Amino acid sequence: MMRTEWGSGVVASTIANVNRDPKNPPYNVTDFTTHFTKVTAANEPISLEEAMHRWA
């Protein structure tokens, strides 16, 4: 079930990126999936408030 959702998200994001305005940022697969969320990379800094929220 999850593979089907991921595959559908890949197709949807590809179609959306082909037809998007070049001024807008590209779409990601997670923009079109319900059970998958975008994860912040470990090398990206987070704010102090976000760190306090995560560690509280």
Image (tube, grey):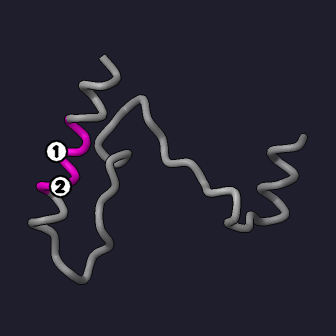
In the picture, measured across the screen, residue 26 lies left or right of residue 44, that is: left
Q: Position of residue 38 (x, y in %)?
A: 49, 48
Q: Main secondary structure of the magenta part?
A: helix
Q: Residue at x 90, y 40 (%)?
A: 56
Residue at disc 1, secondary structure: helix
Give x and y (percent) for residue 44.
67, 66
Please tell me which residue is depicted at 24% across the width and 25% down the height of the picture: 4
Foreground residue among 42 and 45: 42
- Find out whether the residues at labels 2 and 1 contact each other: C-beta distance under 8 Å: yes
Image vertical order of residue 48 relative to residue 56, above or below: below
Q: Quadrant of residue 25?
A: bottom left
Q: Position of residue 3 (x, y in %)?
A: 30, 25
Q: Which mark is residue 26?
A: none
- Look at the image and give the residue range highlighted in magenta: 8-15
Quadrant of the rendered image containing residue 6 = top left
Within-10-Å neighbours for mark 2: few <14, some 14–19, many 20+: some
Q: Type of residue at label 2?
A: Thr
Q: Which residue is mark 2?
A: 14
Query: Would residue 24 appear left or right of 39 to someone viewing this image?
Result: left
Amino acid under label 1?
Val
Between 8 and 25, the one nearer to me in the picture: 8
> Which residue is tagged 1?
11
